Structures are given as C-alpha cells and as structure tokens.
Image (spheres, rainbow, N blue to C red):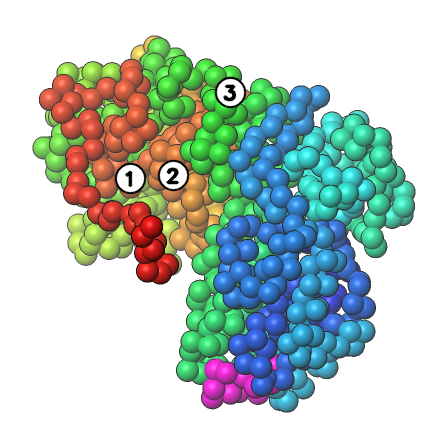
C-alpha cells in the first residue's frame, strides 16, 4: 500500500543536477552503453546501477548522490509480491538480502468513530528505507559501481557528452527534468492535502487507517510496520484543516508532538519521532516524454503516484528492471529508450489513475463519515478501484459477507441483485441498459430494429432498459435516423416495443429519454461521420446562444422567448405520448451538449437575459421544462435527469456546480440523477479510465442527497458490485457491454452462481442459464519426479 514518498527535501533532492538548457549528445549507436551516469542515489537509481553493472561487468557506472550514505527521508518501504518476483528473477543476491529483513503481515485495520474493522488476506512485505539503501549500496560496491556521495552531479548536458547514457533518478523535484522541460514537457499537479512522514518505535500488528474527527476537521493516519520494533506513520489532512489547526505555525518537534496527541489511542500513548520531516503537498508528475537524446527519466522524476497505494519505490524499481531489460534487448539506444517508455507508460498510467482515485478519496474523506462502519471500511479498501468486491471476497469472505449483510443483501445475493425503488417503480436489480443512439429510425418512427434491439436487452436481465435519446421535434433530431415522440404514429410504434418488454420480459422496466439536439443537430449518421454536417437536406438549428458546436459548423439561432415556450411545449407533448406509450420511467436529457445541457454550461450559454449568466439563471429553462414534463407525467412513475457533471474544459461546469444542478432538479421532483460527463464542447479533454465518471456520481449522491445512476466505462459485474456496496452509486448504467452481450446481466448472475428474484431467466432461455461445457485444455500433472535410477530392495 505505502511506499517511501519523501519529505519536501527528500527524494527530489537526491543528486540534484544544476539546471541547464543545452541539448544532450545524440544517442550512441549501441544499446549496450559502456559509460552510464546515474543522477540520484535513491532505490531506483541504485538498483538501475546494480542491474546495468551485473549485466555487463565491464561497464563504468557512476552514481551521483549529494547526500551522505545514511541520509534518508521517510522510514519504511512496502513492496508487492509482483515487484519482489521481478527482483528475485533479475538479481537473487539483492532478493535474498531483502528477504531476511522483511516484516510481513496480512491484515488491514480501519478505525472510525471508535470502531475497528479488520480485513485479512492482503499480504504485505516491508522493510526500513535505510536498510533497503544499505543493501543496494553493498550490492553496488560488490559489483564495482562508483558511488559518489556528498557529490553534486555535473550538469546533465556535460554528463551527456561524456557518457553513453544518463539516467535521471533525481526525484519529484528533478532538476534534470527541468533542464530539458521543453523536451520532456512535464505537468505537475498539486493536490489538496498536507501530509508528514513520521515513525513510531513499535510495530503495528496490521496496516492501520485511523480517522480522527477534530474540532478543525478530519485528520487521517496511515500506519504500517517496517521492522519488528518500528512503524511508519503518515498523518494527512486537508489544507484548510491543517491551517485551522495551526500546523502552519508549528516547527518539526511541535508538529510531531501534536500528531501523537491526536492519535494517542492508536499509538497507545507512545510518542512519534521525525527525521527531517516536514509537511508537504503531494504533486502528481506526468511527462509527455521520458527520454531526450541519451538522457532518460526514471522513478519520481518521470512519474509519481500517491503514497496511499504504495507505488513510489515499487514503480522506480520496476522502471529499473524494464530499462535494463530493454537496453539488453534492443539494437540501439534510441530503440531501447523507446521500448522502455512503451512498456512502462501504460503500467504507470494505470497506476496513476488508481492513485488519483485513492488520493481524491482521502481528500474527500469527510463525505463518507456518516456511512455505516463496515460500509465505510469497504469503501476505503476499494477506493482506488484496484481492490474490488470480488477479490476482497476471495481475500476475506467473512469481512465481505459482514459488509453485505449490513448493506441488506439476502444470503447468497450479490449487491447488484438487490432491489431498488424509485417512486412507484421497484427495480429488481441495480443494472440499467444505458441510452444508446441507434440512428435507425425512419421519420422518427422506431421499427423492427428497435423492437429487436431493446427487446433483446430486456430479455437479458437488466432491471431497466433505456431508449436512445428520443427527440421532441423533427428539428430536435441529431441525425435523420433519430427516433422521436412528436407524432401519434411514433407513439404507437413505441407502444409496440413497451408491450413486448412487459409481456415477454416480466419484471423488466423500460424508460424513455427525452431530448432535443440543440446546436448538435442536423448531422450525419454516426458511422458516416460523427458530428459532420449532412451533405444536403440540413435543417436550421437552435441553441441558447448562437455558437456552433465545431469551428466552421452551422451557427444555431439563439432561442427567443417565444421559441423557448414552443420547445417547452414540445417536451410536454412528447411526455404525454410517452405516458400513453406505456413507458415506466422518463429521463430528461440535460447532458452532452444537447439543447438543455447547452443552457446549463457557461461555455455554451452566453445569454444576457433571465436565462443566462449565473448558475441559477442558466438552470431556469431546464427546470421549466422539467416542471412541464413532471406535470403531465403520471405521478407514480419516476423521472430522472441526465447531466454532464463536468465539461472537461476550462471555464465549464465545475463539480461543485454539478452538485447544485442535481440539488435543484431533486427539489423539483427528480427521483434520481443520471451522472454523465462531457461532450458539451468539441475541445474537451476527458480523463478516461475505468469507471472514470463514477466520482462525480459519488459526490452528487453524498452532497445533494439524491439517488444517482453511475455511467462511464463500468464494464464488469465486479465493478457494479463494488460501486453499489461502497455506496458510491445506487444504479449502474452500462452501454457497450450490452452491445457486446445483450444477456450481460443474466450471464453475470450465472458467473456468480446466483439464481434468485434479481435475475430471472425467461422460460424459453432457462436451458442456457449455465455456461456450455468446453473441451479440457489442461494436461495431467506429473505425479513423480525421478532423480536417478530406481533401487529396488
């Protein structure tokens, strides 16, 4: 979990080179450099030096470290079994030396409001950072590496001229990276918490997370043993809590004593100690490139990942392993450095996404304080999305079972198959088939394609199947293939589909999403050119403001007051037809840059009348439409609203505004908020990743107090179980998985061994409720190993 992320003058200060802007020499023709300089004597730099020397003893390897050999910051280092396996394979000598000093344990303790919950089966191994450095120093000396302590590294352009390879392992504050900023193009993102590395002179018996609710705010402790008689203790809190508590005015000794007092129970009244410890703010480092000429970045100089998932030293060691391997495998240095980055970048990006989720969870920890104790513990353990419901169940079935019981899961029922009620509609499980535009209607009329498409997914077990965005007028279509509800014929066609769902898939609800394309209309079918204008037959567009979606695109007319009334009545009329068509739920589409979304975003609403300006004024028209629809929509049937919780663009809707938008719709009678993001402006920069939109739903659920539907790259039933059980969402909407497998929900039940009311197979399909048998692919295992001739007696 945790690694040795140092204090402000810690890893980033090791062997720091003086800044320069001169280009390094071109890379050598061989990928087997004979002379290599390592800037920085931390674990990553030292291990790189040892590997390079071990692979080619004739190499001349020099490590520059401006600190003394026994200078170190932080206390303990945690390494995963995966990393240790790589070390064992590459250098058994180092592995054996490390192994004798490891402290191992399995449990994680979460202490919150006086209650401790323990989860086991996690398998940690840690040792002291100073001991790790001593082992690497000894190994480097045995191999003949030139270790130069208390020595400032020469400028990197000088090293690049005199060496075949320069490895910049000079930490988060890397001067080498700064010297070649134009080449590496780094981005450093500061975060919202302050933290300090301390130690206790006793060993925790588990990895310990403890939450203290002080008069100034929430303070958290991360603690773990690294020796039989010592533990690392990290204390962390939001910047505003840190200042309110007066830590900004305390020196090192006073801060250490204050932290020991706050966590006196966890420490058993024992003191904490420091080691040049200082409060710092974590910064995420990302570089567009990791090498320039014959200079390459490694470890924290190239990337950082928050200490709460324990990746600093782990990533640096794995970088060293990959760099050494690529130098052996590739024909040229340029190819080797390219291969190193290609291998490591996706691994690091995945780790950084998990680390970002983890650090943001701790930044917003106060949001979850009111959760039931076990759910809070489960939420903490699954915060990074790397630990999930399923692998936590495998590690500790008793703990996970207790969380499920507290949540209300009947015995043998996964969280995703528990029911959920919205107004008069009870959904039998937590899975929603997300709205997906099919662009397959004729004159707005859904046909056989829609019957088969939606009917198949209704038979597939999801509790709620949503239509695509159904347009409220012909001018409100996105493409000529979009479905509508602006004529009686369209209403009759939809009734055919809802009747099929209700008759053939009893227990499945079907919902309609009503919307208007706004400035994103009059475009080609998606597969003919998404967002591209029609070659002919275009219709005029309307929007909150006369701004085209794409440069050079059709400029919409700014809606007049009279036109606003017309559009509102179009929504009202469509809702009446939707009720008559037999839909169980209605969703108002206020996301993705379509008409109502265009009113909500400051990037697309530049109006100066009562419908533009402040967030409250931008909300006015969408709320008027909602009220008009709610007035005619049957009272027992629920209404939801889909919003874009961020525009992924500077100056757009903020996460704080999204909470207020959700709160406003809930106050007007919305039963749930469907939380999506983006697609509002063409120049957006989304941060894609697994379940990447879920944090926005999580925030709205806890801060606005309204049920939410989470969407966005939720692809596995394990993700759904994890999100539901952690209390981050109430329902999960999946799109692409249901295109891949219309029976996704039923297959999820079969794979989990569940056969209950939350997932009923249609009678004609029941014979397929078990996976079909396949041929054996495993070979018989050897039963005997003979080491020599048999000696019969």
Residue drawn 73% across and 34% down?
Answer: 219
**Does dot 3 land on a helix, a strand or a loop?**
helix
Dot 1 alpha-carbon crowd within 10 angstroms: few under 14, some 14 to 19, many 20 or more = some
User: Nearest the camera: 238 or 172?
Assistant: 172
Please tell me which of labels 2 and 3 falls first in the chain: 3
Please tell me the numbered disc located at residue 402: 3
Which tag, 1 or 2, sits closer to the chain's start?
2
* Residue appearing at x 55%, y 66% in the figure: 91
User: Residue 521: image x %, image y %?
Assistant: 28, 45
Is 33 included in the stretch rendered in magenta?
A: yes
Tell me how many marks there are: 3
Q: Do the residues labelled 1 and 2 touch (CB within 8 Å)?
A: yes
Mark 3 vs 1, N-terminal side: 3
Q: Is mark 1 on a helix, strand or loop?
A: helix
Span shown in magenta? 25-36
Helix, strand or loop for the magenta stretch, by majority = loop
Q: Do callouts 2 and 3 mark residues in contact (Cβ within 8 Å)?
A: no
Secondary structure under badge 2?
loop
Residue 23 rendering spot, x and y as whole percentages: 60, 84
Determine which residue is flagged by label 2.
Answer: 714
The residue sitting at the front extreme is: 793
Kindly report the distance in space between the C-alpha atoms of the residues bearing marks 1 and 2: 9 Å
The label nearer to you, 2 versus 3, is: 3
Distance in Å between CA atoms under marks 2 and 3:
25 Å
Q: Is residue 495 left or right of residue 423?
A: left
State yes or no: discs 3 and 1 in contact (Cβ < 8 Å): no
Q: Which residue is drawn at 74% across and 27% down?
A: 213
- The residue labelled by disc 1 is 737
For residue 185, say whether it is visible: no
Q: Choose between 552 and 274: the one closer to the eye.
A: 274
């Amino acid at each position: 979990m945790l690694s040795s992320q140092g204090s402000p003058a810690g890893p980033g200060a090791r062997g720091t080179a003086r800044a320069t802007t001169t280009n390094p020499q071109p890379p050598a023709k061989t990928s087997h450099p004979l002379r290599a300089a390592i800037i920085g004597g931390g674990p990553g730099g030292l291990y790189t030096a040892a590997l390079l020397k071990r692979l080619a003893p004739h190499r001349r390897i020099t490590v520059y470290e401006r600190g003394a050999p026994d200078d170190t910051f932080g206390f303990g280092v945690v390494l995963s079994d995966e990393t240790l396996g790589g070390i064992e394979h590459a250098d058994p000598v180092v592995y054996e030396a490390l192994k004798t000093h490891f402290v191992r344990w399995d449990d994680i303790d979460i202490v919150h409001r006086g209650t401790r919950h323990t989860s086991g089966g996690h398998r940690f191994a840690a040792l002291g950072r100073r001991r790790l450095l001593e082992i690497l120093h000894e190994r480097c000396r045995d191999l003949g590496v030139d270790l130069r302590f208390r020595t400032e590294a020469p400028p990197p352009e000088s090293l690049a001229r005199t060496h075949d390879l320069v490895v910049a392992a000079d930490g988060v504050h890397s001067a080498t990276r700064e010297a070649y900023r134009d080449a590496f193009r780094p981005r450093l993102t500061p975060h919202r918490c302050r933290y300090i590395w301390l130690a206790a002179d006793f060993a925790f018996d588990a990895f310990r997370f403890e939450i203290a609710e002080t008069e100034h705010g929430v303070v958290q402790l991360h603690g773990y043993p690294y020796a039989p008689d010592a533990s690392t203790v990290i204390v962390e809190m939001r910047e505003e809590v840190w200042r309110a508590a007066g830590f900004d005015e305390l020196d090192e000794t006073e801060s250490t004593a204050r932290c020991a007092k706050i966590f006196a129970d966890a420490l058993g009244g024992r003191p904490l100690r420091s080691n040049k410890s200082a409060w710092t703010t974590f910064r995420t480092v990302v570089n567009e490139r990791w090498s320039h000429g014959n200079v390459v970045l490694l470890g924290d100089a190239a990337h950082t990942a928050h200490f709460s998932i324990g990746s600093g030293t782990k990533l640096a060691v794995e970088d060293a392993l990959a760099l050494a391997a690529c130098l052996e495998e590739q024909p040229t240095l340029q190819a080797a450095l390219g291969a190193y980055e290609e291998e490591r970048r996706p691994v690091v990006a995945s780790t950084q996404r998990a680390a970002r989720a983890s650090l943001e969870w701790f930044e917003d920890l106060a949001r979850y304080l009111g959760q039931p104790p076990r759910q809070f513990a489960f939420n903490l353990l699954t915060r990074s999305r790397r630990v999930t419901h399923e692998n936590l169940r495998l590690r500790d079935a008793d703990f996970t079972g207790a969380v499920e019981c507290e949540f209300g899961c009947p015995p043998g029922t996964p969280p995703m198959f528990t029911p959920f009620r919205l107004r008069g509609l009870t959904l039998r499980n937590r899975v929603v088939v997300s709205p997906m535009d099919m662009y397959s209607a004729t004159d707005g009329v859904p046909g056989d394609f829609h019957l088969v498409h939606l009917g198949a997914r209704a038979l597939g077990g999801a509790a709620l199947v949503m239509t695509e965005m159904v347009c409220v007028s012909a001018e409100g279509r996105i493409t000529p293939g979009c479905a509508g509800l602006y004529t009686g014929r369209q209403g009759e066609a939809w009734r055919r589909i809802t009747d099929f769902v209700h008759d053939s898939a009893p227990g499945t609800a079907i919902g309609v999403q009503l919307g208007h394309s706004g400035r994103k209309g009059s475009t080609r079918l998606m597969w003919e050119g998404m967002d591209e204008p029609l070659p002919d037959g275009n219709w005029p567009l309307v929007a909150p403001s006369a701004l085209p979606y794409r440069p050079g695109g059709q400029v919409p007319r700014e809606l007049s007051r009279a036109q606003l009334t017309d559009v509102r009545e179009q929504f009202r009329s469509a809702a009446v037809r939707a009720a008559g068509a037999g839909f169980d739920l209605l969703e108002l589409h206020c996301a993705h840059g379509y008409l109502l979304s265009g009113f909500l975003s400051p990037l697309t609403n530049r109006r100066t009348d009562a419908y533009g300006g402040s967030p409250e004024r931008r909300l006015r028209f969408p709320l008027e439409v909602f009220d008009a629809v709610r007035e005619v929509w049957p009272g027992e049937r629920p209404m939801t609203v889909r919003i874009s919780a961020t525009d992924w663009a500077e100056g757009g809707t903020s996460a704080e505004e999204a909470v207020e938008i959700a709160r406003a719709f809930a106050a007007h009678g919305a039963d749930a908020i469907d939380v999506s993001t983006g697609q509002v402006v063409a120049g957006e920069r989304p941060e894609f990743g697994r379940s990447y939109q879920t944090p926005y739903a999580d925030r709205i659920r806890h801060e606005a107090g309204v049920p939410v539907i989470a969407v966005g790259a939720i692809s596995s039933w394990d993700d759904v179980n994890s999100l539901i059980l952690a209390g981050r969402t109430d329902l999960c909407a999946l799109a692409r998985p249901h295109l891949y497998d219309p029976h996704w929900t039923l297959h999820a039940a079969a794979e989990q061994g569940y056969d209950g009311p939350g997932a009923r197979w249609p009678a004609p399909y029941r014979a397929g409720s078990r996976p079909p048998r396949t041929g054996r692919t495993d070979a018989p295992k050897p039963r005997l190993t003979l080491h020599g001739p048999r000696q019969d007696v």
